[in-house]
Image (spheres, grey):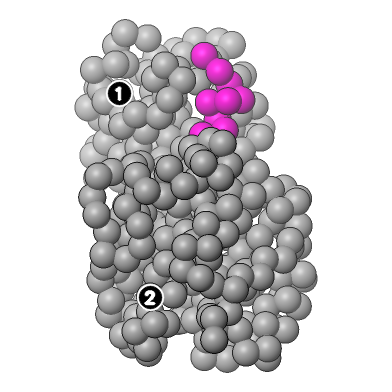
Amino acid sequence: MRTKAAATISLSGPLALQGRQAARGLELWASADQIDLEIVDDAGDPATVSDVYQGWLGAGTDLLLGPYGSNLVRRVGPITSSEGVLLWNHGGSADDLTHPLVVQVPAPASSYFSEAVELAQRLGLGRVVLARSTGRFAAAVVAGARERSAELGLTFRTMDLSDWSVEGSVEDDALLIVGTFTEDVALVRKVLAGTRPGLLGCVAAGLLDFGKELGPASEGIVGPTQWVSSRTIPEVGPAASDFTLRYQRTYGESPGYPAVQAAAAGFLSAEAHRRGYDHDRVRDWRTTTLLGTFAVDESWRQVGHTPITIEWRNGRQVRARRRHWKNL
């Protein structure tokens, strides 16, 4: 009898851009692992995810994968946990999502800008300015960047996205942005219309659609991503090259990290199910997937995987390197 899995995904609504990619990743995993997968469009609505997951809890579903978006995972996690059921979280990275039996696959949001702050120091910049949206995800990103800035001796300042204005020279500043995809792109365009900061980065830059949206204007902008392809052969699931080829053949484009982290969560959940791992064994499990290292601590926080900072060069994402910046 085939294993049954289920997830709600934002195929419509404010997170549809990332949600559709995550759904593709889950579909490729289910096909490869011969899983009967049900995906329901939650349209980004917390009430919908609550109702749907509660229904699955009583329906004998073997594997529950989380929705896309920290606010939705935050709603579902306590529901599944209270029933003693694992929720394989691929789509939420806010730090406060750490909860018993919520298996965190992505790296936490507080680590998103750590490498960008380190890059700012290597560039000799004296201040990090972080323009932020509202919500706990943005708050976690800010907290992590603030902590790393303090450790490296950099001045740190936060501001609301809507309050951005140039007050004197920004050439010695690193401007980092965390909002929705649309908010990030809008502020980047506004910034580029004036004097360019010494370093410019945003969370949206980690998505492949960022380059499509901005075109040549994306050049040199940095951002965090949960995944870049590597030649490492993982212990669980396919190699990155094999998954990428299947994704390209199926969807006509390369996968972004929302698809990869969703697929990785799927392969992990199915492998744990096949092995008959109980909750303690899952929590103690250390392994590798096409996303990278998987390991959670006693609180179920992801500690094996860390984000990678990329920069846009010639229309593609590459690992951020200091030497390029002085040429912009």
- Coordinates of residue 87 in the picture (x, y in percent): 52, 76
The label on residue 125 is 1
> Mark 2 highlights which residue?
271
Q: What span is colored magenta in the figure?
A: 208-216
Q: Is residue 113 above or below residue 202?
A: below
Q: Position of residue 127 (x, y in %)?
A: 36, 28
Which of pointers 1 and 2 lies earlier in the amino acid sequence?
Answer: 1
Q: Which mark is residue 296?
A: none
Q: Please tell me how many numbered marks the rendered image carries.
A: 2
Vertical position of residue 104 compared to residue 113: above or below = below
The kind of secondary structure the magenta stretch mainly shows is: helix
In x, y percent, where is residue 101? Answer: 46, 81
Real-space CA distance between mark 1 and mark 2, rounded to the nearest whole angstrom: 46 Å
Look at 67% across and 78% down and name the residue there: 53
Give the quadrant of the N terminus. bottom right
Task: Determine if residue 128 is in view.
Answer: no
The residue carrying pointer 2 sits among few (fewer than 14), some (14 to 19) or many (20 or more) residues within 10 Å by Cα, namely: some
* Relative horizontal placement of residue 132, taking residue 45 as reference (left or right): left
- In percent of width and height, residue 116 lies at 34, 35
Q: Which residue is drawn at 61% across and 25% down?
A: 213
Image check: 59 left or right of 35?
A: right
Amino acid found under the numbered disc labelled 1: Leu
